[in-house]
Structure formats: C-alpha cells, structure tokens
Amino acid sequence: MRKLFFVIERDLRMFVQYKFLIIMRAIWFVSQVAFFGLIASRMVVPQLADIYFEYYVAGVVVMMLYSASVFIGYDIFEEAEHGVFEYLLSLPVSRKELVLGRSIGGGIRSFILVGPLIAITLFIIGLANPVNFLIAFFSLFLFAFGVSGMSITIAVGLKSADRFDILMGVLNAFIIRLSTTMYPQVFVQEANLAYAKVSEFNPVTFASDLFRWGVGIERYFTMTPMPLAAIIGLVIFFAIFTFVGITIYERRLEGGGWR
Amino acid sequence: MAVIRTIDLTKRFKDLVAVDHLNLDIEEGEIFGLLGPNGAGKTTTVLMLSTVIKPTGGTAVVGEYDIGKSPDDVRKLIGICFQEPKLLWVSTPWDVLNWHAKVCGLSTQERKKRVKQVLEDVNMWEHRRKNVHGLSGGMRKRVEIAKILIQRPKIAFIDEPTAQIDVVGKHKIWNMIQELREEGTTIILATNELHEADILSDRVGIMHKGKLLICDTPKTLKDSILGGDLVEIRLEKEATQDAFDELKSFHEVVDVVTVKPTNLKVHLNKVEEIVPKIMELFMKRNLPVTSISMSEPSLDDVFVHYTGLTIEEAQRKSP
Ligand SMILES: Nc1ncnc2c1ncn2[C@@H]1O[C@H](COP(=O)(O)OP(=O)(O)OP(=O)(O)O)[C@@H](O)[C@H]1O
Ligand SMILES: [Mg+2]
C-alpha cells in the first residue's frame, strides 16, 4: 500500500512541473465558458438560455477532467524516451501497484487542475444539496482514474507517440461528442438512435450527468435511477481499464522493453 | 551457494538471438564480471534477471525465486544501475534518489542519512538541486550508480558503472563497489572495461553473440592462454640467426616477432623463469641487451584470445 502511495506521489510531483500546461488549460476553460458558453446559449430559446449556460459550464468541467486525465499517456512516451520506463519496471513494486498507482496519480493530477474550476462552477451555478455534491465529486475521481487508466493502456498498447496523439484526437471527438457533455440526451436521441445508444453507455455521460445532479441542475437526466446507475457505470469503467491496463502493461512491455 | 542460476536462459528478438542458452551460476557474495563485445547480450541478460524483460526460453533462479513465476519477489532482492542513466527529466538528483530510497523501503531517517552520504561520495552534493536535464553525461551516471549505493540490495546488477566517468571518479566508484560487496551484496558487473573487471571481479564470464564462451577467475583465465606473457627485448646490435633460433628452441617460447632486427617481441609462458636464460643467451653471443621489458597477460589478451576479436573491434558499436 505504501508503494502505491509513492507511485502516486511521483506522478503528482511531475505534474506540478508542467506550469505552462496548467496555465494554458485554465485559459482554455475560461474562454470556453466566457466565449462559447455565453454566445452559444443565445441560440437556445430565450427562457432556457440561462439553464443551457449552466448545463454547458458543468459539461466543460467534465471535458477538462477528461483531457487532463488523458495527459498521463503523453508522460509515458516521455518516460519511454528517457528510459524511465525500464527503471520503473525494475523497482520492488508490483505491476498492479504500478498501473493502479499511475491511474490514480493521473486522476488526482487532473483534479489539481480542475478543482479550482469546479469552485468557479459552483460559484456560477450555486450549490443546492451538499451531500449530492460530495457524492458526485467523489464519483468524478473514479471517472478521472478510469480515463487515466485508459490513456495508459492505449499508450502502452500503441507504443507510438504519433499514433497515440492521432488516436486520442479521434477518440476525443467520439467520446465527447457522443455524450451529454454539451447537449442533453433527448437531443442526441432525436438526431440519431445509434448515437443515443453510444451516449447512453458512455463514461463521459455518466460523469457529466452525475456532476449536474451533484450541483442540482435537475433537468434532462439521461440515466435512471440517478445517481446509482451512473456511479455503477463509472466503477465498471475504472475496473475495466485498470484490469486491461495491468494485462497490457505486462504483455507489451516485458517482452522486450519499450522498443 | 549459487545466488543466481540461469538455466538455458534465452532471449530472441525476432531473428536475433541476443542471449542464447545461457547457463551460469553466480555465487553469493561475489563480484561477477560479465564481459563481452558490444551486442554480446550482457544488458539483455541483466534485464531478464531483473524481470524487466521476459526471456523467450529457459529461466533463471534469483535468490530462491524463479524469474518467471515470482517476479515480484525477485524484484525485492535486486537493484540495477542501468547502462544508460534512467532519470526523470523534470527532477533533481536529490528528488530522484530520495524517491528511489522511499520505494526501496528505507525508513525516513535512514533515507535522509544515506541520500546525503552517497551524494557526497559520488561528488554530486553540490549539484543536488540542479535539474537532471542540465547535468553532464558523467554526472547523470553518478546519480544512476548512487541509486544502488543507497539501496544496498542483496543482489546488484551494475551495467557499465564507469562509462563516461573521469579517472578520479572511476577509482572512487570502484572502491564503493567493493565496499558494497563487503557489506554482503552480490554484484553482477557488466562491463566493456577489462581492466575494471580484472581488478574488481572474483570471477568473470565472457559472452559473445549471446553465448557464454568461458567463465573462471581472472587469474586462471590469464594463465590459460599459452604464450600469454610478453617480453620485449632491445639489442645494441642486430640479432644473429643462430641467436634467434636458439631463442625459439626454448619450449616456453611460443612465438618470436622481429619488430626490427634490434627489437624482438617474444610471446612466452613462465616469464620469471625464462628471462634469465634469455639474458644469458644474448650475453654468450656478445649481443648486449639495452633494455628488456615484461608484461603479464591482461584480460584484454584473454578477451582477444576467446572472442577472436581485437579490443578495437569489440568496442566498435555492434551492427
Ligand atoms: N529491445 C530490443 N529489441 C531488439 N533487439 C534488441 C533489443 N535489446 C537488445 N537488442 C539486441 O540484442 C543484442 C544484445 O544487446 P545487449 O544490449 O544485450 O548487448 P550488450 O552486451 O549489453 O552490449 P553493449 O556492450 O553495447 O552494452 C544486440 O544485437 C541488440 O541490438
Ligand atoms: Mg550493454
């Protein structure tokens, strides 16, 4: 258990070094809210404009969380380049601790970034029910751990920084667009039933809906019963990628290191 | 008792057999020098024994654990100093070593003490707060070796510890490796520097193209090459044919090379016994000797003898 903590600690320490990234991401968030959110909500029928704005702000938080959690995959390539990968594999830490530790570390990192933005969101939307909020907040951790695990799994599976970058771009387009981050499920359903199916079983949808439930935007829920279904969805998502991650890690790396 | 035993340990990378049915015993508490030209398979062997990569055939027992079946237990016994320093690019030497010590299970007090001590020992204390990125190659290597000196594992794999390190630093590191052994660590030293292997190792094994060619104490290996001793003689006058023939007739003499008519190189055995006889031979013929120099065989000669490569060829990067 202590080892797990050290693995997490290392990833956190590393993250604080990325000052440029952190600042740029914060600017990205502010501009999404201040420009896109404010302008796009004018396109909605006037009496729903404020609601859509809140809906959208909550969605952007989850988008941020997603992209910040993916970031650990890029670290893996840096590490491979510097050979740190082999070093980690030689330490008295089990593969499970290593993958789990890094998923958790990667997830917590994104909270360092997104935490203050959540505070801003609460300021904008207000807080209806603190207990709900706490449940949602902790569920978002699971989401972040799962996304980090997914990113690690894909990075290690591909072993190519270029392909990883391209694939993550495409995956981002699918997983974010076909979710309820930016529009409620009813509209996805109206557009296309297949889209609706993907969106319904998408961890990004679970996370977005949970967060909205937590901050008390009670409209347009996708899942019932809330919040249980979404939490279960996130637990499954996290478990799958931790498990697949450990397996891929062992298979892909120990065969011959990174090359 | 063997603390490491490899059983037909093999690693294949596609068409290339990097390590080929390696059978090797390493005794507890010894410094074992693993020698071989570039690409011989030394690093690959070390990485398999430390469970970083998996063998494609055979296995090995490290401590009492099989590397395939209980890799987690194996990793609790070992430490590696990698050939290429593996340091986190955003850290400082102090952070790197402190984290390493934590993961290896040192208590807080022990950790603080040892990290400081070892950083001083490898002359990196004043650079401890510099970014690893900005360190020179030799400095990074010092940090790399410091990991193992702090960790003091039961079994240490040290891959080319002094490549890129200056002469003073080399001697310091050699001393520290010996101290580590005195504290009970078994050391596997993979190196290209035969002199280093010679002074540190209790036994050496020479690998070539993935195979173990020979394995014994440096002394036995040196004695095993016929004509391993070399005597270089300079004469005042040109050597006569009959002097030359008589020299060749000693049965300890393996070969006589005429560098110049006044300069002979003699490959022979048992140098201590035969040098007086050689002196006498030339005196008798009134051919005064201006100088005579002797050298014992080095591991270089052993290496050349068994691999069939010159040192220069061996150190050229493998294809
Ligand atoms: N991950 C890998 N994939 C493919 N080939 C590899 C890999 N690692 C090593 N090799 C090859 O295996 C052979 C043995 O390499 P290894 O690094 O073990 O040699 P070495 O004895 O340590 O050499 P050096 O003295 O240069 O360090 C080389 O031909 C090398 O190219
Ligand atoms: Mg090597």
Image (cartoon, rainbow, N blue to C red):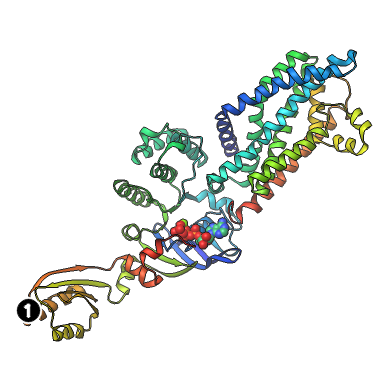
Query: Could you say which quadrant of the image residue B13 lies in?
Result: bottom right
Q: Which quadrant does the N terminus of chain A fall into?
A: top right
Residue A67 x/y as whole percent: 70, 32
Q: Nearer the viewer, residue A12 or B260?
A: B260
Instruction: Please determine whether, in this image, residue A136 is positioned above or below residue B101.
Output: above
Query: Could you say which quadrant of the image residue B277 lies in?
Result: bottom left
Secondary structure of the residue carrying tag 1 is: helix
Query: Could you say which quadrant of the image residue A29 lies in?
Result: top right
Residue B159 x/y as whole percent: 44, 53
Q: Nearer the viewer, residue B45 or B263?
A: B263
Residue shown at the point (68%, 43%) measured from the top left:
A164
In the rendered view, does B213 fall on the left or right side of A170?
Answer: left
In the rendered view, does A50 fall on the left or right side of B157?
Answer: right
Classify 10 Å Cα crowding around label 1: few (below 14), some (14-19), many (20 and above).
Answer: few
Residue B87 x/y as whole percent: 49, 41
Which residue is tagged 1? B283
Three-letter amino acid code of the residue under disc 1: Met
Q: Nearer the viewer, residue A108 or A97?
A: A108
